[in-house]
Image: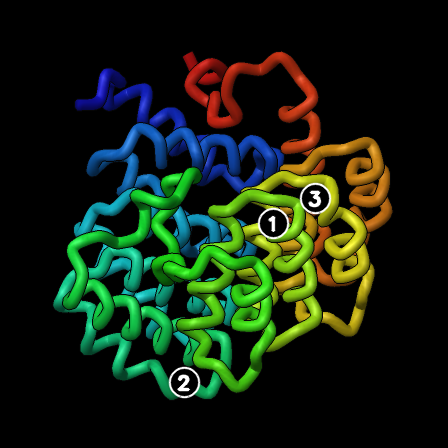
Amino acid sequence: MSTFTDVQIRSIGGVLNDPNRPLKERFRALFTLRNIGGPIAQECIKQCFSDSSALLKHELAYCLGQMQDHAAIPTLISVLRDVSQEPMVRHEAGEALGALAAPDVRAILEEFKNDPTVEVAETCTLALDRLSWLEKHTEDGRKENPYQSVDPTPPSEETDVTKLREMLLNENESLFNRYRAMFALRNLRSEDAVLALADGLKSGSALFKHEVAFVLGQLQDPVSVSALLESLADKSENEMVRHECAEALGAIATDVCNAELKKHLNDEKRVVSESCIIALDMCEYENSPEFQYANTLLSVQ
């Protein structure tokens, strides 16, 4: 049960929805609302989908999926249907619907599994595969997940790094099974597993590589920094991948990460430059005595 007043929650929502506030403050407000949860927090998040920042909107959708509140489904369906929204935003809405895993989302996912935008189509196909898997299993994979995130697929039962790496990099394998290998490697948290994941940044679709980068950000292992930096610096790489590499580097937060992220603050791709802003804020947080990242309540009281 929330210990926050409605006024406090709406004040945090005001920070999120104020385009004149620094982006890093708006991100911290978003994650504060995600942690608080409940209908008012969700209402504040939903209001922000008209923003001009694709990075922020994709994070809104991610948070709605992670909050595990089925009241978000109509909003997420609306975002997925809206072809004026950026591909990374629509993809994240589809992934969030898969994360919520309600039976009534199957129809909309079926509708968009052949979307002309490949990231959206792949996401909806993955979400449908997740729903089918959950129908046959009582666990959703979080039991083995040290990060407690709601992932697009459960982890593979395989624990051998060599076999998991082969599955991860096999482009003839289904995306669902490659993701399962990805999350199994993440859960092992060994250096060999991290290096195997880093190899995934050179293999497969933009959707696949962006998820690899996200997982490397969860792991926060410096051995992946060189691979992440290479993808971030590659101007021919999909901006969705580069953005996720930037945020992963922000989570790892070494001095090298900090210095390299600053070089991309003026990248011609807005989503990349904004990701570097957020990543540098994460670097600052990771190297500070701050107790929590999602701390907006402290600044609006």
Residue under numbered circle 3: 249
Q: Residue at x 40, y 85 (%)?
A: 115
Circle 2 SS class = loop
222 left or right, relative to 182: right
Front of the two marks 2 and 3: 3
Front of the two marks 3 and 1: 1
**Mark 1 or mark 2: whose residue is earlier in sequence:** 2
Mark 1: amino acid: Leu
**Mark 3 or mark 1: whose residue is earlier in sequence:** 1
**Mark 2 or mark 3: whose residue is earlier in sequence:** 2
Q: Position of residue 31 (x, y in %)?
A: 44, 35
Rendered view: 174 above or below 241? below
Label 1, label 2: how many angstroms apart (C-alpha)?
A: 28 Å
Label 3, label 1: how many angstroms apart (C-alpha)?
A: 9 Å
Mark 2: amino acid: Asp
Q: Residue at x 75, y 61 (%)?
A: 231
Residue under numbered circle 1: 216
Q: Is residue 266 visible?
A: yes
39 left or right, relative to 184: left
Q: Is residue 46 visible?
A: no
Rendered view: 156 above or below 19? below
Mark 3: amino acid: Leu
Indicate which disc residue 115 carries.
2
Q: Nearer the viewer, residue 287 or 202?
A: 202
Dot 3 and dot 1 residues touching (CB under 8 Å): no
Q: Quadrant of residue 290?
A: top right
Rendered view: 45 above or below 203? above
Q: Position of residue 299 (x, y in %)?
A: 49, 16
